[in-house]
Amino acid sequence: MSRFVRPVAQTVQIANGESLSSAVALGAEGERQLCALQMPAAWTAASITFAVSADGTTYVPLYFGTGEYTVEAAGGAAASCGVSLEPRAFAGWPYVKVRSGTSGTAVNQEAARTIACLVRGV
């Protein structure tokens, strides 16, 4: 019998004029997975993508399936919403950052944005 383990919120921030957040640590063995985002009340309209790292230093775009893992929340206007993610996309990655826009077309935020990242154990 399995028991439900409540996700834990970790916050990250995208600085004013930037497109990439600080990192969420998912554990050295990738034993936790990112499963949802709670977006801030204000958001410069953009899709959401992710950058991942094996060592916490070098980040690369996250691909899942046939392309860059992209979340289109409310047509790209992701303010004040909850965003469910596919946890398998983050399996094995110990570090992840949230990106405003895509790796090819990043969108700088017009103010600092704090995002709650819901992380669960596997």
Image (cartoon, rainbow, N blue to C red):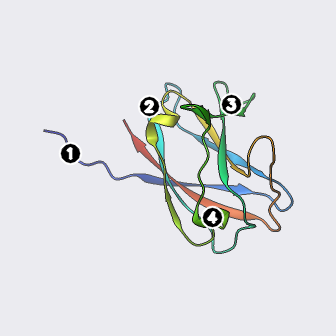
Q: Quadrant of residue 44?
A: bottom right
Identify the residue position indicated by label 1 in the image. Answer: 3
Is 14 placed left or right of 67 in the picture?
Answer: right
Q: Amino acid at mark 1?
A: Arg
Q: Report the front residue among 32 and 78.
A: 78
Which residue is most to the left?
Answer: 1
Separation of disc 2 and disc 4 at Cα?
A: 32 Å
Counting from the top left corner in percent of width and height, residue 79 is at 63, 70
Secondary structure under tag 2 reads loop
Identify the residue position indicated by label 2 in the image. Answer: 31
Give yes or no for contact between labels 1 and 3 (Cβ–Cβ under 8 Å): no
Q: Amino acid at mark 3?
A: Gly
Is 85 placed left or right of 12 in the picture?
Answer: left
Secondary structure under tag 4 reads helix
Residue at horizontal 49 percent and vertical 29 percent from the top: 30
Secondary structure under tag 3 reads loop
Is 113 placed left or right of 85 in the picture?
Answer: right
Identify the residue position indicated by label 3 in the image. Answer: 56
Residue at horizontal 66 percent and vertical 46 percent from the top: 49
Q: Nearer the viewer, mark 4 or mark 3?
A: 4
Identify the residue position indicated by label 4 in the image. Answer: 75
Residue at horizontal 34 percent and vertical 53 percent from the top: 6
Give yes or no for contact between labels 4 and 3 (Cβ–Cβ under 8 Å): no
Earlier in the chain: of badge 4 and badge 1, it is 1
